[in-house]
Image (cartoon, rainbow, N blue to C red):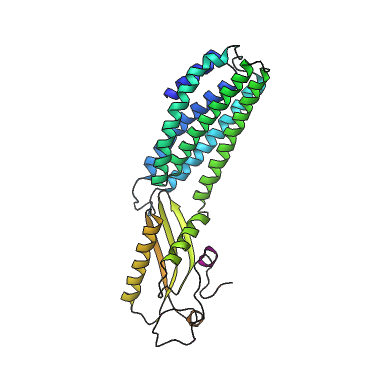
């Protein structure tokens, strides 16, 4: 709220399209922060009988609402600037607005750093989105001050409107980017970076009894990951042996991913297509000499196919 007040005072004393768009972005930051806080609290609620996977999707849902709000405001600001329905730019706008804009930039920088650290630690789309909003606010304030300084130095006042429209374009782009990320989470789009990290962890800690892993899918529910797939173990193992090996696998992956994970694995018995790629030794039931392991890579983990792939 303090930053919004400072930006509002800067527009009040200086006028112009640039300061208007900057104040409008700060107003957006306040609204989206309140919306994000509510959504973040909702997303942290534990799972219940109506929501067996928890409420983590609320994080992405509210991020999508934020994007729509930001995009709508960008259209309104663009219309206002094109029609000229705003306070005209004053001659001494740069000197009048500088103290307010500089103070707002310092406050935004500190708050953005805190939100960024929180978003990385909690894997929250909302907190990370808010950090980006504030960082973009710092950048736009610097751009507005540069434009006002140029006008103060003698360049045409039309430059101010150009700066204002550029800022509106940046706001609209931020809305599109946020909507793209939140829709990916809502639609359970596969995150190639997460799948690559999973493959890297499997290769790093590979064990002979992990004969094959395939049909792997990763879903995000707020801060929690849900990973399911098929794991091939020796067919002659007891259920207790396979269960123990599976728990070891889950423990290793959870430590490598460093975030809450819920696993759902389907255990497969090894079959003839896997025999030549099995490192288990000694094996009294081997039918084919060992040739090579099945690599754990994103392109081999995803297909629903047992044995060598491509």
Instruction: Give coordinates of residue 168: x percent, y percent.
Output: 60, 30
Horizontal side of 95 relative to 231 (left or right) equals: right
Q: Which residues are magenta?
A: 280-305
* Quarter of the image with the N terminus in it: top left
User: Does the magenta segment cover residue 263?
Assistant: no
Front residue of 284/63: it is: 284
Q: Which quarter of the figure has residue 249?
A: bottom left
Residue 148, percent from left and from top: 59, 19
Residue beneath the point at 35% across and 46% down: 45
Quarter that holds the C terminus: bottom right
Q: Residue furthest top?
A: 91
Q: Residue at x 55, y 29 (%)?
A: 140
Please identify the residue farthest to the front as the structure is shown.
Answer: 153
Residue 135: percent from the left, percent from the top? Answer: 49, 34
How many marks can you see? 0
| Image height of 194 relative to 128, above or below | below
Per the picture, the main secondary structure of the magenta-coloured stretch is loop
Give coordinates of residue 15: x percent, y percent.
57, 16
At horizontal 47% and vertical 45% (from top left) the residue drawn is: 60
Q: Is residue 100 visible?
A: yes
Locate residue 68: give its quadrant.
top right
Residue 39 in the figure: left or right of residue 309: left
**Residue 190 showing in the rendered view:** no
Indicate whether residue 295 is drawn in magenta: yes
């Amino acid at each position: 709220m303090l930053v919004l007040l400072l930006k509002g005072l800067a527009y009040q004393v200086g006028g112009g399209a640039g300061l208007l768009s900057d104040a409008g972005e700060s107003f957006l930051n306040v609204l989206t922060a309140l919306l994000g806080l509510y959504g973040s609290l909702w997303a942290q609620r534990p799972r219940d009988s109506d929501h067996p996977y928890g409420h983590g999707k609320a994080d992405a849902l509210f991020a999508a609402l934020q994007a729509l709000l930001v995009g709508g405001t960008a259209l309104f600001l663009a219309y206002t600037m094109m029609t000229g329905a705003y306070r005209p730019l004053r001659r001494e706008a740069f000197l009048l607005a500088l103290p307010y804009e500089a103070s707002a930039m310092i406050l935004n920088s500190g708050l953005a750093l805190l939100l960024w650290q929180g978003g990385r630690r909690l894997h929250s789309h909302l907190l990370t989105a808010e950090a980006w909003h504030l960082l973009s606010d710092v950048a736009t304030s610097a751009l507005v001050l540069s434009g006002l300084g140029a006008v103060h130095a003698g360049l045409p006042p039309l430059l101010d409107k150009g700066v204002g429209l550029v800022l509106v374009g940046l706001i609209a782009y931020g809305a599109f980017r946020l909507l793209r990320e939140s829709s990916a989470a809502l639609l359970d789009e596969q995150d190639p970076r997460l799948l690559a990290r999973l493959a890297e962890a499997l290769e790093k800690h590979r064990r002979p009894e992990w004969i094959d892993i395939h049909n792997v899918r990763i879903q995000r529910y707020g801060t929690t990951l849900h990973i399911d797939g098929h794991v091939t173990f020796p067919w002659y193992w007891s259920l207790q042996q396979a269960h123990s090996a599976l728990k070891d696998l889950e423990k290793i992956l959870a430590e490598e991913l460093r975030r809450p994970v819920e696993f759902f694995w389907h255990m497969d018995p090894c079959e003839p297509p896997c025999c030549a790629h099995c490192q288990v030794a000694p094996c009294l039931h081997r039918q084919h000499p060992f040739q090579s392991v099945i690599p754990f890579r994103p392109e081999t983990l995803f297909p629903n196919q047992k044995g060598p792939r491509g």
